Image: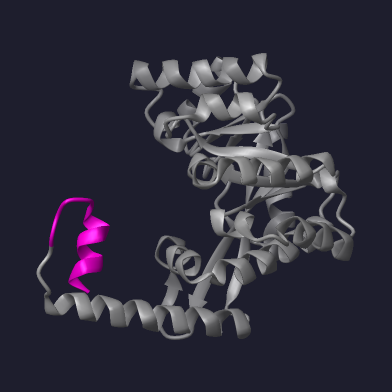
Amino acid sequence: MAMYAAKNTGRGTYCFYEAPMEEQIDARRALEDALRRALQENQLEVYYQPIVNLKRMEIVSFEALLRWTHPVRGAISPAEFIPVAEETGLIVAIGEWVLRRACADAAQWPNGTRVSVNLSAVQLRNDDFAQIVFSALAATQLPAHQLELEITESVLLQDSDATLAVLHQLRGFGIRTCMDDFGTGFSSLSYLRSFPFDKIKIDRSFVKDMDVQEDCRAIVTSIAHLGQSLNMTTTAEGVETREQLEAVMAVGCTEVQGYYFGPPTPAADVAQVFSRLEKMRLAA
């Protein structure tokens, strides 16, 4: 236990064993067991947050976000259970379930609205991943162009060549691809050269302060212009206020996502999200 604690801290260090280490391992093991049951007992649910086109002021996509309501603990944060799912490999089964659920829900939405699904490195390392995606589309009859797959730079860093090969295969089938959290890593620009992403999502850490900090505004402006030059959609994440909305519109972002247009919502309430945005558009 002390050895793994030292490894997690970083290279060239050491730790002494302490009783809380064992408690943490027991808690993690209990969470893993509960997560396995959650998948079997339908405790997991997919919520959807709207992504709005700024020129037309209409919903063009929803991001699929996994939620878990434990029968005893209640809502458990994805930040707590997703790392466990990835470490244990459970993310493969969970990811396939999310993909199928999201495709099935999106097939019922109007106007060809797309659905955006996040991927982990573990899923992309699965040799059958592309076939899993094709199977989900076939089973739900969702057109390939209505599915967007989001990956972060950290996913590309783990096995760049193999990951890019899978992404090229999926894109060749008509599926859209998106680089998430753009600007937070070290090699974002090099990946834009090696793969023609359809969309780049500007991390919320830049968006939230762009109306008060010039450096954040300059970064968002640069990314928006880069997207225009490369013919890529740019989505500003974390837009929560009117001031932030006006700021990202002013610098040329294509789309926005955030609580200003609505929080993540269950599939049953998506129709209300469409209605609410239509009222906002007419009132503008």
Image quarter where the C terminus lies is: top right
Answer whether residue 252 is visible to the viewer in this image: no
Q: Is residue 36 magenta?
A: no
Q: Is residue 6 magenta?
A: yes
Residue 80 horizontal side relative to residue 137, left or right:
left
What residue is drawn where x is 54% and y is 66%?
A: 67
What residue is drawn where x is 77% and y is 57%?
A: 133
User: What coloring was used for the rendering?
Assistant: one colour
Image position, residue 43 (x, y; %)? 57, 79
Image position, residue 258 (x, y; %)? 53, 42
Image quarter where the N terminus lies is: bottom left
Task: Locate residue 151: give its quadrant.
Answer: top right
Residue 176 horizontal side relative to residue 185, left or right:
right
What residue is drawn where x is 65% and y is 26%?
A: 254
Range shown magenta: 1-14
Residue 213 horizontal side relative to residue 86, left or right:
left
Seen in the picture, residue 95 relative to 178 is either above or below; the reply is: below
Answer whether residue 170 is visible to the viewer in this image: yes
Q: How many marks?
A: 0
Seen in the picture, residue 19 relative to 270 is either above or below; the reply is: below
Residue 149 or 260: which is nearer the viewer? 149
Residue 63 or 83: which is nearer the viewer? 83
Image position, residue 239 (x, y; %)? 50, 36
Task: Locate residue 255: give its quadrant.
Answer: top right
Image position, residue 116 (x, y; %)? 68, 48
